[in-house]
Amino acid sequence: MLSINQNAGAAGLPDFRNLGVIARVLVAVELFGFAVALARTSGWAEAGAEFASLSAVLQPALILAVVLLYLLHPWLRGLPYGLGAASVVAVALTALVLVHAVAGAVLPSLEASAIARHALFAFGASALLLFYFHLRGRALSPALAEARLQALQARIRPHFFFNSLNAVLGLIRSDPRRAEAALEDLAELFRALMADNRQLCTLAREVALCRQYLQIEQLRLGPRLKVEWRIDRMPGEALVPPLTLQPLIENAVYHGIEPIQQPGTIEIQIERRSDQVHAVLRNPYRREGAHTAGNRMALNNIRERLALHFDAEAALSTREADGLYEVHIVLPYRTGA
């Protein structure tokens, strides 16, 4: 599910179904192969020939190993790290033996003794890659992820909290039921902000949190705040990092709705396209004014957490056009299964 297994303090195998992980494996093995070829020869020309000879067997074995790891990933991620790492090495060696058997039948010139040398290469490459992903997992450890999340949580503006309480106080006598509902929304919002948010949540839960936030903002902004939800094609079961959409909607309210006196609309469109989930948020935008000078901490934080969870398979982009500010998030479609 994740590009980095983020169980607190525990080592984990990489996600062998993640495009970023697959790309790193392919590139790293090729570089390692060329380094070995260069070490075994005395010049660039000889190294090229040696690398070509090595690649004739190792590249098919590499592709087969990647396919096997992709298929076996649901089983591998359930194993303890030591057993999982040993299984990864075993898969690489099995792929090499199978390719060697086929290559030996097709290429009579292939030395039978070469399998030992190639097996040693496969073992070394597997060990180095596992070590690299282990170090990368430690660099992107839960402590670092939690620190980034705390920075995001601290971004909730104090005046939002006090304005919300004042709006609720104004409703207690005139509309006690609405005041009670607003307090429940406020409590749920802060409960989500203070929770341990290292695990993914469903998109439906994230959208429900956004609706609660917008209901609170509606108390003080009234008809100035309009929201268009286009989520008929939203896969509610898809998994996303918690607090991915809510900070963006808060940005849209603060930078897009508050600075203007006339009513403004926030558009939220979420849909699944093939094996990806696309979320697009649009709000009014003015270049002039104090609100436009807000920092980009929320955007940068969300971008970092998307990379932490999904590596190269997720992206966040922004653009300004026709008086609108647009944020576009692309996520891989993942479910609890």
Image (cartoon, rainbow, N blue to C red):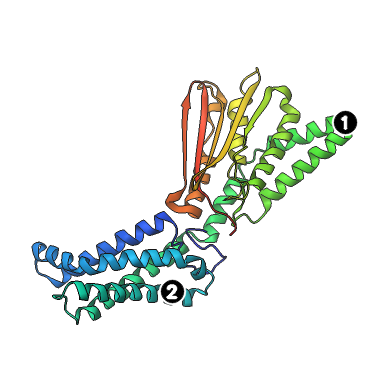
Of residues 195 and 26, the one nearer the viewer is 26
- Residue 244's image quarter? top right
Q: Between residues 187 and 234, which one lies in front from this camera angle? A: 234
* Front residue of this view, candidates 81 and 55: 55
Question: Which numbered disc flags the more N-terminal residue, 1 or 2?
Answer: 2
Q: Image height check: is 1 above or below 187?
A: below
Residue at 13% from the left image edge and 62% from the top image edge: 48
Which label belongs to residue 126?
none
SS for callout 2: helix
From the viewer's perspective, is 63 left or right of 212? left
Which of pointers 1 and 2 indicates the residue nearer the eye? Answer: 2
The answer to whether residue 305 is left or right of residue 189 is left
Q: Residues within 10 Å of mark 2 (few under 14, many from 20)?
A: some
Q: Residue 302 in the image: x percent, y percent?
A: 53, 45
C-alpha gap between disc 1 and disc 2: 61 Å
What amino acid is at disc 2? Ala
Q: Quadrant of the C terminus?
A: bottom right
Q: Is residue 285 above or below residue 42?
A: above
Residue 114, position in %: x, y?
20, 78
Q: Is residue 265 visible?
A: yes
Q: Which mark is residue 85?
A: 2
Give the amino acid type for the residue marked by disc 1 in the picture.
Answer: Asp
Q: Secondary structure at mark 1?
A: loop
| Dot 1 and dot 2 residues touching (CB under 8 Å) | no
Question: On the rendered structure, is 220 left or right of 78?
Answer: right
Residue at label 1?
A: 175
Percent position (x, y) of residue 123?
Answer: 32, 75
